[in-house]
Amino acid sequence: MTHPASHADLSANLPADLPVKLRERAAALDAADPLARYCDLFAPSEGLVAYLDGNSLGRPLTATRERLASFVDGPWAARLIRSWDEGWMDAPTELGDTLGRVALGAAPGQTVVADSTTVLLYKLARAAVDARPGRRVIVADTENFPTDRFVLQGIAAERGLELRWITPDAEAGVTPEDVAAAVGPDTALVLLSHVAYKSGYVADLPAITRIAHDAGALVLWDLCHSVGAVPLDLDADGVDLAVGCTYKYLNGGPGSPAFAYLAAGLQDEVRQPVQGWMGAADPFAMGPEYEPATGIRQLISGTPPVIGMLPMRDMLALVEEAGMPAVRAKSLALTGFAMEIADEYLTGVRVASPRDPERRGSHIMLDHPDFKRVVAEAWARGVIPDFRPPQGLRVGLSPLSTSFAELAAGLSLIRNLLG
Ligand SMILES: Cc1ncc(COP(=O)(O)O)c(C=O)c1O
């Protein structure tokens, strides 16, 4: 079976052995989905039955092909180096402002697109601990993504600081109570993921931010699994610092640059450690000493990855058109349907993610001892979730590119492979 050419074909492409009740339920959910037409805007993928990994690498939009081609012929080939003065120099902050408006709840001048998540995590975490001299502790959790933990280990060694680990319930996530018990007058920084990369648990960002602030600490949020899927209100929630990637729900493509948010009120207080010419007050002065740019530009280090910023512009336009509340509503309907299928049809499979919609991101984790084998076999048949050790199958549901019929088709193949 190939990926359905259009939304109208979706039910026609469901596998023949799909239970009738499930087929009808998927068709009804697709028929009622106000965002269904967006599924047709993504580039077809030969042999694909169900893409359940949009939380790892989003699918390309068809429009992106044209955007990339016209970039080569236009700003690059025709305008050459003049393009730096005609928009490229401002691209990190101009795109950052768009991202802030569409997906972060951030007023202009606080978001920049640059580097990778890992590098921006390092820059912001180092800047934050240096801005709280005398405080020796960084609070983090053992369930966070490896890069977050590894970056902090490096900073702690570099600055002679102590890491205080929260060990949350792996199927839930870090709670305000966990944070309240871990922070104190010694805490410089708290680093957490808003949506946990395994369980999909949504942390209580406003409450945790308040608790850290009451202890005098700064908070750095990793928004990789939130941005473009879970609404954010960074300014209103008083967030200090945040980073996230753009190749998941923002469909920026492999290795697309990350973003960093630095609240306006902190921009004169922090100083990031990777001093490069592009983050200098006047990059073309070529002077003897580094003088940081003011405002959000100070977070830039080297030449902006202009090509890597192109595809996400198409997705941001769609997200803005659809609106984050509608995107979130579809995300919850998809994860809810995935849980319903798991409960009713996947014998022996356990849902290892929060059932409470308020605490649920846009992916769910399913648990079964055979999932390593099953995921490998599913990939070969065009159903693509991902495997997370020890025995988790992660179902990532990108709201604008995934239909309910596609999800039903994917999970019914998983059922057949479980035997
Ligand atoms: C929570 C989280 N942080 C960071 C990253 C990745 O960092 P980078 O973009 O530098 O590879 C990921 C990647 O999946 C992630 O899930």
Image (cartoon, helix red, strand yellow):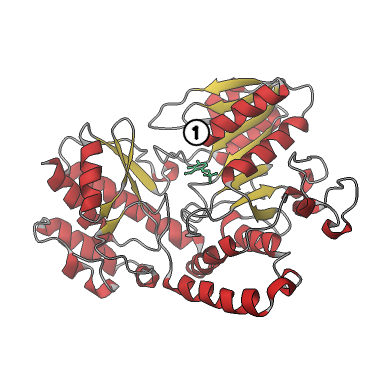
Residue at disc 1, secondary structure: helix
Left or right? Give the position of 315 relative to 119: left
Quarter holding the C terminus is top left
Which residue is label 1 attached to? 146
Quarter holding the N terminus is bottom left
Left or right? Give the position of 316 relative to 391: right
Would residue 209 be visible to someone looking at this image? yes
Image coordinates of residue 306 in percent, x first then y, are 63, 63
Image coordinates of residue 295 in percent, x first then y, are 79, 52
Instruction: Name the outermost residue toward the right.
Output: 288
Residue depicted at x 65% and y 49%: 260
Q: Nearer the viewer, residue 52 or 376?
A: 376
Q: Residues within 10 Å of mark 1 (few under 14, many from 20)?
A: few
Residue depicted at x 23% and y 68%: 10
Left or right? Give the position of 381 relative to 290: left
- Residue type marked 1: Pro
Residue depicted at x 22% and y 49%: 378
Left or right? Give the position of 306 relative to 352: right
Question: 236 above or below 404?
Answer: above
Question: 102 above or below 159?
Answer: below
Image coordinates of residue 52 in percent, x first then y, are 32, 52
Question: 378 above or below 132?
Answer: below
Q: Nearer the viewer, residue 310 or 364?
A: 310
